[in-house]
Image (spheres, rainbow, N blue to C red):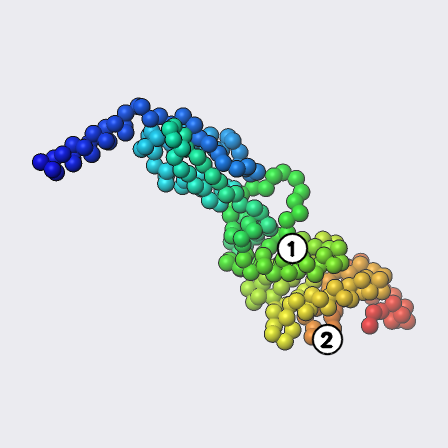
Amino acid sequence: MLVCALVLSYAAVISVVRLPFFPLKQLVVAGTLNQVSLIQIEYVTRMSFDGNFFTVNLDNVRNAFEKLPWVRKASLRRHWPDGIELTIEEHVAAARWHGGDGEARLVNTRGELFAASLSDGPTNLPLFAGPEGSAPLMLARNREFAELLALLGHSSRMVTLSPRLAWQLKLDDGLTLELGRDQAKHPLHERLQRFTGIYAEVRARAKASINTIDMRYPNGFALRLGRAEAAARREMPTTDRNSKGIT
């Protein structure tokens, strides 16, 4: 008799819950959204909400929202008597990503990759190119690079990490900076500090556009001029070439 009473009680509760007395009437979106549009939210709501206040499967709805391009995490909770409250954590893009697979993605501020489209128009986000799984390391390193480059009033437009873990920067003025591999005796931070110390003088003395500065040497650096300037230097007499050289 006790088992029968429990079964009947459960059946009664299920029947009441499924009655059309508890329809969902509203979805409350908490917080401000910058990338996820109202149209996207309405679409997911219409496609994934099935059932009433008690029977709607919040896990299924959450998974549906987290498939939207700019959604990093979604959470939902029932809001008595007829609503669902939705909270969305959006991705915040920190860089563009170009991996070995050729797929264009974005890197968020946590170093995570995600697929989404940026708004139309130019962007000041740097481009990362490196091995798969290296995005967190590249993001952390680029923050260090940015602090030192800011002393010169410049920033990195492209950061490249080779399969052998050699670093290369492309600055906003077109200069390529070869930093090489990080080493205990000659760390990247030290090389970049040395670059910031000599950059202004090198620019002033070169009197020509510089294509690349190679900082991989322990106690020096190498310059590579632009193609036009390099060709002109080759055509100059020996005396002129020596008088205009940089030591």
Q: Which quarter shows the C terminus?
A: bottom right
Whether residue 107 is visible: no
Where disc 2 sits, the SS reads loop
The residue type indicated by label 2 comes to: Asn
Q: Which residue is mark 2?
A: 219
Q: Residue furthest top?
A: 20
Which residue: 66% across, 47% down?
A: 124
Mark number, residue 158? 1
Give the camera-side residue of 118 and 101. 118
Q: Position of residue 184 (x, y in %)?
A: 60, 74
The residue type indicated by label 1 comes to: Met
Give the camera-side residue of 124 and 18. 18
Q: Is residue 81 above or below residue 211?
A: above
Q: Is residue 39 above or below residue 168?
A: above
Q: Position of residue 183 (x, y in %)?
A: 61, 72
Determine which quarter of the picture holds residue 140. bottom right
Q: Residue furthest front?
A: 2
Which residue: 76% across, 58% down?
A: 152
Where disc 1 sits, the SS reads strand
Number of callouts: 2
